[in-house]
Amino acid sequence: MKRFFAYFGFTKAERRGFSILMLLTFALGIIPFLYRYFNEERVLEHSVTYFLAADTEKDFQGKDVRFTPRDKEGKKRYEHISYFYFDPNGLSEADWQRLGFSAKQIAVIKNYEAKGGRFYKKEDVAKIYSISKEDYERIEPYILIKEGQRKSVKINEDKVDRKYGYREEIAPQLIDINEADTSDFKKLRGIGSVLSARMVKYRDVLGGFHAISQIGEVYGVAPEVYEQIAPLLVVGESHIKRLKVNTATKEQLGRHPYISKKQAMLIVNYRSQHGAFANLEDLRKIPVLDDDFFRKIEPYIEF
C-alpha cells in the first residue's frame, strides 16, 4: 500500500483522506445488502399476509396453503400451517393444529365447547382469550359457520363468561322481507344502501316474496352474506300479486323476473291458438316450459 501511495506521490494527509474515502465507499456498498438480509423475514410475513387476503374462496377451495413464517426474534412460530375453509364448531384438534394453533390454545377452545359454548358468527372466535388478534386475522377469511349455528340465544345482556371473555348476544329482531323498507334491510350485516334498494325493487317486480331463499336471488347478494342474514329473515302473511295468465299481454308477462320475453310470447301464442288455460296442467302443455320454470312461477300466476 505504501508503494501504491509513493507511486502516485501522495502526501501523508492525502493518504489518510484516501483511506477514509475507501472505508466510506465500502460501507455504503455493504449497507443495502445488510438491510435486505435483516428485513427478509418482515418482507416474507407481509407477502404471506397480502397473499392470503387477496385470494378468494374459489382459489383456495380444496387446496392447502403452507408456509413457515418466523417472528421478529427469528424463531419459528409454526412448524406447519394449512389453510382451508372450516366451521369452528366441533372442529377436531388435528384440524386446529393444521391451522397453526398450539396444544394450550386448542385446550381452551375445547374446554369452552365442553361447557356448551358455540360459535354463532365469525367474531365469536376472536372472543376466545387464547386466540390472539393476529391468529384470528389470519384464519378469519376461512371461517364458514353453518346456517344452523347462527341462532342467537336470548339471555340477560350482562351475562358474560368471564373465564373466556365471551359475551352471548341478545337475539336481534327478525325482519319481515315483505314489509321491510330499505332502512330495515340496511340493519342486516353486509347490506348497504345499494343492496337494500335492490331488495325492495326485486320484491316489487316479483309481486312479493313467498320464500326467504328469494333474497339470495337479488343481484349482488353474495352466498356468504345470504347465509349470514337468512336466519334473521321471515316471510310474513302478505298477498302475492298474481298475474292473470288468460288476460295478461306478452309485455305484462315478460316484465316478471321469472318469465323471459320468449316464454311470454309462447304463452300468449299458445293461448290464442288453443283458448284459455284452465289450470297449471294446461300451461304444462307448452313443450319448452320446464319444471324449473313452473316451480318458480306457480306462486305468481292465476287462471
Image (spheres, rainbow, N blue to C red):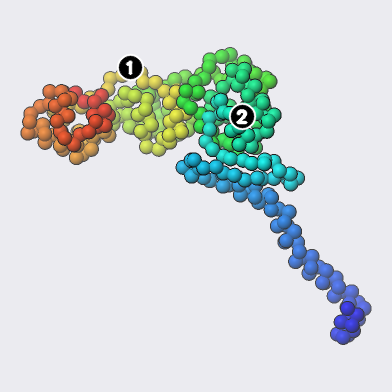
- Residue position for label 2: 93
- Compared to residue 167, the image places residue 272 above or below, namely below
Percent position of residue 185, x then y: 42, 28
- Compared to residue 39, the image places residue 303 above or below, namely above
Residue 237 marker: 1
Q: Assess disc 2: are there few (<14), some (14-19) or many (≥20) residues with their C-alpha within 10 Å of its C-alpha.
A: some
> In the drawing, does residue 276 fall left or right of residue 30?
left
Percent position of residue 197, x then y: 38, 33
- Compared to residue 23, the image places residue 129 above or below, namely above
Of residues 186 and 25, the one nearer the viewer is 25
Q: Amino acid at mark 2?
A: Glu
> In the drawing, does residue 79 fall left or right of residue 247?
right
Could you tell me how far apart the alpha carbons at marks 1 and 2 are, in whole angstroms?
A: 46 Å
* Residue for point 53% across, 17% down: 153
The quadrant the C terminus occupies is top left
Q: Do we see residue 250 in this rendering? A: no
Of residues 242 and 163, the one nearer the viewer is 163
